[in-house]
Image (cartoon, helix red, strand yellow):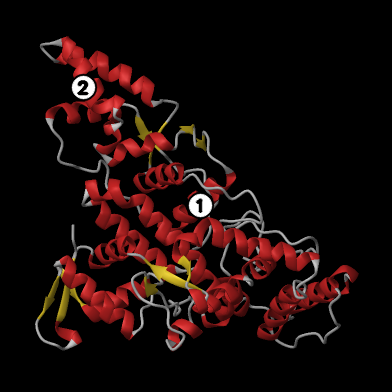
Amino acid sequence: MYPIATELKVGNNQLDSYLPVRNKNNEINWQFVTGLALSYALKRKIESYNSDQFREDCKIHMQELLDEPAFWSVLERMYFSSKDIFRISPLFLLFHAQFVGEKINSGSTADKRLGTLFANLMGDFSLRYPIQGQLNFIEQEMLNKLNEKIKLLGKGPFAEEQSYLPYMAKCFQSDLEFLAGHPQYLLQELTNTLRLYAFSWCAQLALNLDNWQDGAPKSKSLFFILDTEKASSERDKIKRFGYKWFTGQCEKLFPILSALEVLQVKGERKRPLWQVYQDCLNYPDTSNQVLDQINDYIQKFISREERDLPARERATDLEGAFRQLLSVALEQFQGKKTERAAVNRKYVNELENQICTDFIQVRGRAGKVLVLNQDRLLLLTNLTVGKNEKLRLHELLRGFEQRGFYLDNQSAQTLVAFYERMGNVERMSDSGDAVYVRKTV
């Protein structure tokens, strides 16, 4: 396959893949997104069947099953009036995102973009169906009734994208499998897990944009403090690789990802920038056709008057051409008072407000910092320990880092104190290697 589009057209900047936000209309219904993600993970769907219809079917079934049909009114109050029916099994979350055929029946464009993100993090991975839980007789009968309406999803409605961050996809799949082994915890924490990964995905994507020449990305340092800590300006890693580092990299997302769209082959699965570059390097191109094509595009791109970009020499190799392509993509948005810069800033603001807001706090003179509160710390801990009984502290912190969350030594000490209050730590000695952390599930 030819590694890039056969015709590189110079036009308006467009973004159609990898980033789940646009410069406006990004309100997210996380309940809907949770149903969508679970549906894709199970490869199952509920089609044109709402909770009111389910209630009526349960009523008929239970009145036939029970010796006292009048007992249904008690069950209705217990499970339906209180909405406790949605706390029985994760399968009831499928009601939140319904399908018509292979198409999603409702939800905003922003919700569906997040669905695409999680679907491509899963790839070919799927959870075993059905998810087993500890149900009483009545609840099992209701679940059996629901199972009659659950159908195979098939391929699903999402555009295919090769994972930009394979290491994060591996963690995400492992964490979903762990949650599925604890159905009540899955019910409680699936939405929070998705919010955790939506943030970390966008942050790690931004931090990895500059490393396209190095092959598949690796987790990049991004430092957080615990919400109980003070944000001291003397914390070097927090200062250098915290919020300012993150938001500065986020300003590259729209320019670089829109430049990547130009290179994608129409009708084929979307590829990350690092993969496109590798494909170009590996293409048997003795006539330098790919290099000439990118050079021609760059020259046309900078000749547009409205971009106000300086002329430059044609690149002599592929790496130089890619560097030049990304350089002009970024330069067109520079100049704080330009219209293009304002559009790019909207992307960053929408990302912070819709995806990242729970992880950012303003701390007086220290300004904005990245923060993990106690609920997210416990969730992150349980996901990282996963199927293990316990992990050594340094193994746990490496697991945090694979998921995009870094803590400096001071935060790590505060974390151990937090675990000791929780009662899920075993300290064999004063050495950090001898501190073991258990999950709380």
Residue hosting label 2: 75
Type of amino acid under label 1: Leu
Any part of residue 123 in sight: no
Q: Closer to us: mark 1 or mark 2?
A: 2
Q: Callout 1: 10 Å neighbours few (<14), some, many (20+)?
A: many
Closer to the camera in the image, 421 or 140: 421
Residue 275 vertical placement versus 435 (above, below): above
Where residue 400 sits, quadrant-wise, is bottom left
Query: The disc labelled 2 sits on which kind of residue?
Result: Leu
Residue at left offset 40%, top offset 60%: 196
Quarter holding the N terminus? bottom right
Query: Taking 139 as reference, is 161 above or below it?
Result: below
The C terminus, quarter of image: bottom left
User: What x and y, as percent, mark residue 432?
Assistant: 20, 85
Residue at point 34%, 45% (across, down): 42
**Residue that badge 1 annotates:** 114
Give residue 29's position: percent from left, percent from top. Answer: 49, 44
How far is disc 1 from disc 2 in space, using C-alphas? 36 Å
**Residue furthest toward the right?**
305
What secondary structure is found at the residue carrying circle 2? helix
Q: Secondary structure at mark 1?
A: helix
Q: Picture coordinates of residue 18 (x, y %)?
A: 56, 61
Q: Residue at x 38, y 77 (%)?
A: 230
